Amino acid sequence: MDLKDIQELIKFVAKSGATEVSLEIDNIKISIKSPTKKKRGSSDEGEPTTIIQQGPAQVMAAPIVSSAPVTVIETSTPAPVADENSNYITIKASMIGTFYRSTSPESPPFVSVGDTIKEGDTLCVIEAMKLFNEIESEISGKIIKVLVDDSTPIEFDQALFLVDPS
C-alpha cells in the first residue's frame, strides 16, 4: 500500500461519515479516527487522524559457520499415543453465536451424554443475531461428550459434541 492509496482511504473515510476504521495489510496496521465536533474558535479543521504502524519484520537468523566439529545427539521419541477420541466423530458448529443445550433454562437439554441420536435429531440451538437456529444431527450414533458449556459463545467450526457412530 503506497501513500496515494492511504490518502484515498483517508478521503473515503472522511466522506463516508465513519467515526473509526482499522485496516491491517501484511505487517502494516492503519487506524483512521474521525474527530468529534470541535468547539467554536478551535483551530483544528476537523481532518481525520491517521495512525500507521508497521508490525515487526520477520528477521531470519544468519547461519552460524564453525570450523569445530559438531556432535549430533539423537534422542528417541516415544511412540505416538493413539488418540482416545480417534474413533469418534466430532460435530462442529456451522456458525458463530451462542450455544444452548435446550430451548429454555427450565427445559431439559436436547441431548445428553449417553443418548442415542439418529440423523435429523435436534442436538442444540445456536443463537445468532437474535435468531435461534436448531442444529440437527447429520449422523446416527451415541453422544460420548458435550464439548461446550451451555450459554457460551462459540466460533464457526468449533467442536460441539463427540459421537460414537458404532
Image (cartoon, rainbow, N blue to C red):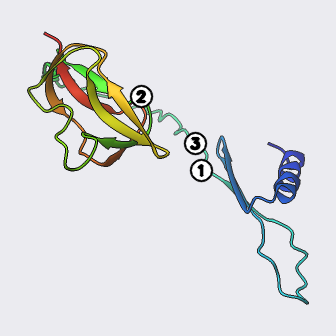
What's the distance in space between the residues labelled 1 and 3, CA to CA?
6 Å
Q: Which residue occupies the foreground of this view, 158 or 102?
A: 102
> What x and y, as percent, mark residue 85?
16, 22
Q: Which residue occupies the foreground of this view, 107 or 58?
A: 107
User: Which residue, given by chain and number where applicable, does mark 2 sit on?
Assistant: 94
Residue 164 vs 159, above or below: the answer is: above
User: Which residue, given by chain and number where applicable, does mark 1 sit on?
Assistant: 56
Circle 3 or circle 2, nearest the eye: 2
The residue shown at (59%, 50%) is: 56
What amino acid type is highlighted by mark number 3?
Gln
Residue 44 vs 117, above or below: the answer is: below
What amino acid type is highlighted by mark number 2?
Ser
Other-residue count near label 2 (Cα within 10 Å), few / some / many at <14 / 14–19 / ≥20:
some
Any mark on residue 58, and which? 3
- Relative to residue 143, is residue 99 drawn left or right? right
The residue shown at (83%, 87%) is: 39
Element carrying mark 2: loop
Residue 159: in sight, yes or no? yes
Circle 2 or circle 1, nearest the eye: 2
